[in-house]
Amino acid sequence: MPTPTTSQLLPELSRRGSFGWTLAGRVIYGLAQWGTLVLVAKLGSVADVGRFSLGLAVTAPVMVFCNMHLRNLYATDSTGRFGWSTYGQVRRVTALVGLLVCAVMAASLYEGTAAWVIAAVALAKSIEMLEDLRYGVFQRFGRMDGFSKSLILRAVAGLGALTAVMVTTGNLPLAVLCMAAAWAAVWLLHDRPRSDALLDARGQSHSAKGGSPRGLVLMALPMGLMWLVDSLNQNLPRYVVEANLGEELLGFYVPMTYVVTVGSAFVFALGAPLAPRLARHVAERNAPAFAKMSLGLFGLAAAMGSVGVLVAATVGDIFLGLAYAESFAAYQPEFVWIMIGGAMHFVLALSMYALTAARLLKTQAVLYLVAATTTGVAALAWVPCSGLMGAAKASALGLAVGATGAMLAVTFACVRLRRGGPHA
């Protein structure tokens, strides 16, 4: 029997354990993100947690806008309108722009340790953007093992570097810079060579061109705006908390919200391998299969969110005390509302895979804009008088509005597909 070629082996590898690899990578990386805040809290101070949280909050909107969700666009590009090199060219430029904008913001709006932390976080996030597009190659061709191995390597290397520096020096900006260096090593030594080899094996050279960078930017711009607004939806309460209550209380609020990040690892493990299949259902006008898969994702997201709310309501104080410090246990009521918002976030996030496959990109941007506006207005009204509870409830309200709108939009996509509507 002849030995199968690499390209022949790829489908078999993608069928076996795709979900398992995705779940493992997302969960380990989600735990590492959460563990970063835990370590900063235990090895530093609540003020350090506040500065790190501020760095995440300041850089997130800029970096997610510059990201423009190119990974998912590439993974679901069933038409091949744009070549890999075009995606890569746009990503390199946007990563640099995001880094420069965040550096200018850090230097002009903040000072001291906070400014250095923001700049270091921006560098780490720009490297993450370069890696993220490489994940689109793994995702598109069903090689979630490559995606997940990179996440695991980043989790171990990044958290290890940050821990080593915090233990030896206690210098938070230096620790974040070393974490960024560890991520860069994973990108150079793992992500680039393996994704290039996969492109070549699939007959799509990593130097292949197609479409114009300007055309790709114009197509992806609604996605960038959508994720910008989504980031604002998550971060507006944090800005209001920092402005009204100070960095220390921000240091209590953000670590509780990062528990949702661990849950999101499961959510994205569900959605990422299914994104290309959803795109195929749309391309084939298979409305029943598209609707069934979308409904199943909604049900799983809701079930996972309900478990999180139950845990927060019953043993949330014990969990917070053990994970961070005893002083966090007093915020169990706020933690419950944060987990309610997390449940809404899970539903909203999974709906985006379906809407992206249906190319309802502008619809997504509108949904996130409505959700962010709701969150921002509620936070401005509630945080000054209700503190962290006001922030938690404002976030939950905005995400509930977004999740409701997203489910209605997916329903519209199913109806349009069933009627044979145009594929945007």
Image (cartoon, grey):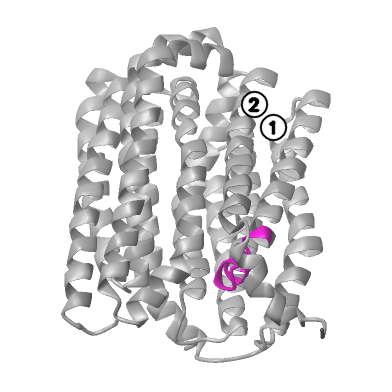
Q: Which residue is mark 1?
A: 172
State the image coordinates of residue 286 (x, y, percent, origin top left): 30, 76
Side (left or right) of 138 relative to 321? right
Asked if 353 appears above or below 103 in the picture, the reply is below
- How many dots with numbers? 2
SS under mark 2: helix
Residue drawn at point x = 37 percent, y = 45 percent: 300
Q: Nearer the viewer, mark 2 or mark 1?
A: 2
Q: Which residue is mark 2?
A: 40
Can you tell which quarter of the image residue 87 is in? bottom right
State the image coordinates of residue 4 (x, y, percent, origin top left): 77, 81
Asked if 145 appears above or below 177 in the picture, the reply is below
Instruction: Kindly check if marks 2 and 1 are in contact, taking CB atoms under 8 A apart as contact.
Output: yes
Residue 261 among magenta residues:
no
Q: Residues within 10 Å of mark 2 (few under 14, many from 20)?
A: many
Residue 144 among magenta residues:
yes
Tell me, yes or no, if residue 12 can be seen here.
Answer: yes
Q: Residues within 10 Å of mark 1 (few under 14, many from 20)?
A: many
SS under mark 1: helix
Asked if 298 appears above or below 395 in the picture, the reply is below
Which range of residues does the magenta coloring cover?
134-145
Of 339 and 216, the residue lying toward us: 339
Residue drawn at point x = 52 percent, y = 37 percent: 262
- Amino acid type of the residue that numbered disc 2 sits on in the rendered structure: Val
